[in-house]
Structures are given as structure tokens and as C-alpha cells.
Image (cartoon, rainbow, N blue to C red):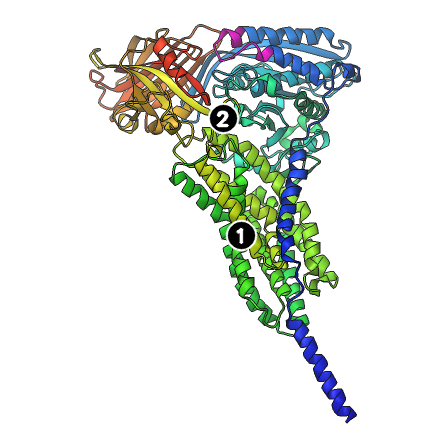
Amino acid sequence: MEDKEQLISELSLEASEEKLKQQPAAKVPWYFANGFLLFWGLLFFAVVIPLFYRLPTANTMEDAKKNVFIAERAYANLYTLSNLGNKMVGSKINEVDAVNFLLKELELIKANSLKDYFDIEIDLSKATGSFPYKTSASYYQGVQNIAVKFSFKNSTSDSYLLVNTHFDSKPATPSAGDAGFMVAVMLEVLRVMSTTRQGFEHPIVFLFNGAEEIAMQAAHGFITQHKWAKNCKALVNVEGGGSGGREVLFQTGPNHPWLVKYYKQNAKHPFATTLAEELFQTGIIPSDSDFTIFKKYMPGLDMTQIINGYVYHTKYDVIDIIPRESFQNSGDNILNIVRGLSNATELRDIGAHKGEHSIFFDVLGLYFIHYSVANATNLNFAVAVATFLLVFVSMWRMAAKSEVSTSYVARWFILLLVLQLVSFVLGLAFPVVVAYVFDMFGLSLTYFSTPWLLICLYVCPSLLGLCLPITIYFYFQRGGKINCAYHLQLSLHAQAIIVALLMGGLTYLRFRSAYALMIPLLFYILALAFNLLTTLHDRGYAWSGVLKFIQIIPFLYSSYLIYTFVAVLLPMQGRFFNESNPDLLIAGLVAVGTVLSLGFVIPLINTFRRPSTVILTLFAISAVGMYLASSTQIGFPYRPKTSGQRVSYLQVRNKFYEYDGTLSKDESGYLFNLLDRRGERPWMGTRVNLTGLQSMKTRCNEHMMCGMPLFDYRYITHQEACKFLPRDKPIEPPGEVTLTLLNKTLTTATTMRYYFNLTGPHQMSIFVKPYEDVRLSNWSFSLDYLEKPPAKGYHVWINVGIVDPTVIFYLDITKSNGDFNVPCYEFGASGHWIQNEGDELSQKFAASFPSYSILAQWPSFYQRYIF
């Protein structure tokens, strides 16, 4: 009887244990679910945003005796420089006023320097030259550079450090941020170093160049022609892509990792990422810097201001919006970096220290990390292998605790891997679908002035994609032989495997930005390892507490990283041109950021009862945001002063001359280069009269370069997307563009040399298109450009600085039959009066644009000839 009772008792105990095993682990009450989601949002706004915009306290003149960077003094220099006005190449303000200001300040610095310690030599030079740049042959004449050689008296080094920025401007901007800010910073760095009893090994050349905005021409002139150029072995290039905030290190080397080491050692306020370098070098960012020229001759660091790109190259780029603390941030960094590199032993023999790229990034501006590509490859693959091993151990443990086979757990894992892959794809795809649909209905750029809409339009749909499939799965799933907590772990393991495979693939393809995937994955496997080493792995949802806590670190970094790119790229969408949908880029970027930041977090909503409340909340936020973006003024992209619409057009006068010299066409109108996706649609219903606006596609098929005075490579690249608005009253240009054929000489039996004289304004272009049996074999400009003949015609972009705008050049035209008594080629000459507002009718037309429009327009004259 006792044996029977004992047997019944044992059977009851086993049944109880089996029942317990089958029951789902206890879940957190449902009303905490949205609070869990809110926690991550608050963490972002409480930690990431303040650290991203954090700036040091600005030093004042009271700190001058400490031999530190004085923001107040730099601010005063910028105040004077920016108030000179627009510094376009060739203008008096740029070539005379700005140069005189800089020379005066430099002479003052020299006079106050410690002459027993330092030598300062100031050199003003002019340069003329040509080189290929994007779609054009860039030609410059008389552009100016102010170079300052600063050396320690005991130095015997013939290796110089070059520190460069520019003082010229784009049209219609005082350019306080781009790059007057860096001019002021460089002046203060030189001032501090020259009054501090601190020696350095290598001379430093501070270069203030006067023609960067026009294809980096002054930088080319310096590095190819200046007497100190051959001694310059490394570069610190400082630029402006915004106004205020911190400067980011976004390009290094190339292939000189020791430079990053010096940045780490000396940058007081680090802000850098390898991902920025890789993204910039794809060419999707519509900007460039002198680093593009210099890196062909020497390695270096390229740093730029990035905050508030809305004012970049506009009339609103003024000193009033730049805080003094921003000067202090950049000044502290650049002063220390220049001091560090001026003592770098690597400058003695640059070639001996060439190596692979580095992976580098800052952590919330608090710390800087860098390591070699080789170490990154080893680390990434090690994390991937560890992921596979720990996931296998976890599955084995689940099987052992659930008293099932490992293959049984593996079958569930495969199912969850498929579901998690679907979630991963949907997390990336949903925001892109929203961007596509909005654009389809003409609603692109709704977030442009209201960035918080990104949360509604892209973040919440991405989160829905990440959690919807797996939440539906858990709604219908009843555990089987393993409990729900294990199923949730398996789904997260599946996410880890997907990330590991993706990271491994990117690493194999040598994408340095794979580190961004490694960070959240590393912290996931650390949490998994901890849970496996303790009993938490098998105690219901207890393991999730460790995971939630440890994912705070990768969440902060990943959201900080992606926010950096959102802050940089979002204002740029206003100048991405209208052929492509910029929302796809922003949506994709936000989606990637959401997956990186919350990919291991959002499935944890299934640790709460009724996770559907989170899905409903995400859906509601998305729906409300889409309504506001599409149906209210909140979604209108532009605001006066802060985030305007860029409007670029030319007041065009075109004259076409035939082979016999007769004038066949004389037309006037406005040529629009539409800079954003919405194009001319925002002007509909305003005072802007667009009656007769024409597409350029037919003209571009019929005429060389559309028969228009296309200004730069942006106009040429997007020529078919431009639009032309004819006007009846002829435009009278404020000056003449005169082309004179001086003579033509037969140099060989099949080649004729044509000598020309071109006079006009300081910005001109020539266009050449040989006929089918004719070839342009030589000319006065860049021969490298001739090696790859452009299909639509040759373009020479001419900019003249301090000298008279007269250009004498020749063309060698080769024809196989040697018959030059018939038409051989089309020739176009154009001039641009950039500082001129045009005639009365043009000014009236400009005044009709809405208050949110930021105009860049001027009179242009184009003459087409046939020779």
C-alpha cells in the first residue's frame, strides 16, 4: 500500500513538473509595454541629443594669458571678415578687401609673435592652371593664395605640415560658416602658437586660399606651383558644410592610419566616424572640399562643420547663428592636432608609414576609438563565430532543460529564423514604402522643416516591420515542448545570426563600416554569455532583464551614429535635384538606424501581456504623423530664413550664329536648375508667373549643351532636368562676352589650329562639340580631360581672379580628309555676371518668389558659333 502511494506521489510530481514546464513564463502586465517603448525614446532625447550638441565653455580675453585658444578673439575676426559681404572669385571684396584684411591680421600676428622662438614668412601669390574636374576642364587665371610659413628657430626639418582653408564664397552668401569660421579659427591657432614658448619640429604652412568654391582651383594652384608645396608632407584641411556646432573628421589618409592616431591623442572633443568617410566617397553628398585636390599629393585629415546645413551656401550663412562655444570646440581640436602633427616623426618619411585604412569612431563625443582594418577583420569574424557558438550552446541548453532533442529545438529555430528574416526585411522596407508612396503623390520632403515627422513616417513603420511578424507568431504559438520564453530567445538568436551573416559579408567585401553592425551584436552575445553562465537563461523571462540593460550601450551609440547622418543629410535633401527621390535615402537611413538601435530590443515587447497594444500605438503614431505630413501645413517643406527652398536660375540671353556669320536665333528667358524634388510645384498659386515653362529635353537633343550657358558641372549633369521660361523682352546683359578668332594655322595635313581671344566677366565658359568626322586633338587647357571625350560636348569652366578677364587659347581640330572649308565644330562662349541682379524686369520677377525662396540667380550671355 505504501509502495502504491509512493508511486502515485511520484507520478503526480512528474505530472506537475511537466505541466509547469509547458506553462508560459510569467509576463509583465500589458500597461508597462508602451512605457518600455517610451523608455528608449526618452533615453535618446535625454542622453544622445544633449551629447550630440554639447559644446565647451568659450574662452574670453580674460583667459588670454593662459596661452589657450580664445573664442572671443576668433569671433571678432569672423565678424569683420563676414561683414565684408559676398567674396566671389574675381570680385573686389574677395580679391582686394578680404586679402587686405587677412594680410593685416597676419602682419599683426607676426609683429606680436615671440621672435626669439619663431620665424613667420607671409607670401601672397597668384596662380594660373587647368585640370579636369567632374564633367569639365577647370581653368583658373590669377586666383590668389595667402600662405604663411611658421617655423621654430631650432627646426632643421624640410618636411612641412599644411593647414588649409578658404576665404572665398559661393554666390549670394557672406559665408560666415563656409569657411570664414575656419579662417578665423586658423588665425587664432597661429596667434596662440606664435605667442607660446612651445617649440615644434616641422614648419607649418597655414594656407588661406581664395578660390575653393569654384572647383578647388586655388588649392590646385598652390600644390602644383607654390615654392613651399613640394615640402608639404601632410595636411589638415578644415571646411564648413554648415554653421555652428562641432566639426566632424570625415576623411583621413588615404592609407595613412598614423594620422588617426594623432587625432586620438590630440583632439580634445572627438567627433568622427569611418562611416562618414565611406558615405562621402560614394559621391552621394553634393559637396566637395580641397581635400579632393590635396590627397593626390599628400595624406591628411579632412574636418568640416556640419550642423545647420540649411544655411550652407545661402544668404543666411551669417555670424549671428554661430555660438562662440562652437569656435572653442573647433579651436581646441585644431590647435592640439596641429601641435601634435607638427611634432610627428612620421613626417620625416611619409612613404615609410603608409598602411591600410583605419576604423575610427567617437562614442557620444566622450571617447575616440580606432584600430586597423586587419584587427577589425579579426574582431568582426571573431564576434560572428562567437555568435554561432553561443547560439548553438543556448539551443543545446534549451533542449536539455526541456528534455527534447537538439534537432527539435533547431527546427523551431529555423522557423523563427525565417520569420525574423521577414521582420528584418520589413523593418527596412516599410519606411521605404512610405517614402515611395508619399513621393508618388507629390509629398516628398514633408520632414524637411519638421524633423520630428521622421519618427512618425519612418521610425514607427520600421518598428512595426520589426515586431509585427514575430508578435503574430507568438499570438498563435502555444509553446509545444519548449516554453514561450525559449521561443523568444530563439527569435533573438535568429536576429543575431542575420546580423552576424550581414556583418561577415560586409567585412569580407572590406566595408569598414561593418563595425556599426558589430557593436550591437557584440553586446548581444555578451548578454547571452552572462545568461548562460548563470541560471537566468532558463528562468522564464529573467534573461531579458540583462539583455535590456546591456543593450542600452549599443542603443546609445547606434542612435547617435545615425542621428549624425540624419542631421547632416536632411538639409542636403533641399539640393539633391529633382530627378531622384531623396526621401528614399532618408527613409533607408532611418530604417537602418532603427534596426541597429532597436533590433534586439523591440521583440522584447512579447515579454509583456498584450504586446498588440504596442503595435496599435506604433500604428496610431504613424497614422497621425502621415495625416499631419500630408494634409496640414506641418508637412510643407519650407520655412523663411530657417529652412528655405533653394531656387537657382539664370537670366539667359542666347544668340546663335551660323557658319556664314548670320544670326539665326536670339532668345531670352530664365533657365531653372531645379534643386529639389518638388521643383517648381511650390510656386504654383503664388505670384510667380510660370506661364510657358518648358522642358529642356528637346533642346538638349537638338543643341550642344542644350544651347544654354550652363554654369557649372551641376547644370551640366542635370541639364535635361532643367526648365526654361521664355520672356518676350530681351535681357540686356550688363557687359559683353567677346570671342575673337585671332588666326588659324594648318599644323599638319589633317590638323588646324585655331587661336582665340575671349574677354568678358570673371566667370566664363567655353563649349566645343566636333562634328562626326572631326576630333579635338589638343588645346590650351587640361590634356587629361581630352583623354575621355564627353558625349555631350567639351566644357571649359573659366574663373579669373585678380587679373583682367581675358583668356587667349588655341584648339587643334583634326579631320581625316583635311577639308577645313566646311563646318567642323560648334563653339559656345558664355559669361556670368554673378554679383548683378539684372534688369528691372528680372528684378521684378525675382521679387515675385515666396518669402521661403532663397534665390541664386544672375544675368548670363551665351553665343553659339560654327567654325
Q: Give the range drawn in magenta.
A: 81-96
Q: What element carries label 2?
A: loop
**Residue 362 appears in the figure:** no
89 part of magenta stretch = yes
Disc 1 marks a residue whose amino acid type is: Leu
x and y, in percent, of residue 164 in the image: 60, 20
Mark toward the start of the polypeptide (1 vs 2): 1
Is residue 5 toward the left or the right of residue 670 in the image? right
Whether residue 391 appears in this view of the structure is yes
Instruction: Give me the residue at 38% from left, 40% from top.
Output: 440
Residue 318 picture location, percent across and down: 57, 17
Dot label at residue 639: 2
| 205 w.r.t. 2: above or below | above
Residue 122 sits above or below residue 217 on the image = above
The quarter of the displayed image where residue 45 is located: top right
Q: Does the magenta stretch include residue 792?
A: no
Which residue is most to the bottom?
A: 1
Tell me, yes or no, whether the two marked residues, 1 and 2, touch with CB atoms within 8 Å: no
Q: Residues within 10 Å of mark 1 (few under 14, many from 20)?
A: few
Q: Which of 413 and 195 is in front in this view?
A: 413
Q: In which quarter of the image is residue 267?
A: top right
Secondary element at image label 1: helix
Q: How many labels does the image show?
A: 2
Image vertical order of residue 160 relative to residue 788, above or below:
above
Using a 10 Å C-alpha cutoff, classify the residue at mark 2 as few (fewer than 14 neighbours), some (14 to 19) or many (20 or more).
Answer: some
Amino acid on which disc 2 is placed = Arg
Which disc, if any, is residue 814? Answer: none
Residue 52 location (% of width, % of height)? 65, 34
Q: On the image, numbered disc 1 is attached to which residue?
A: 616
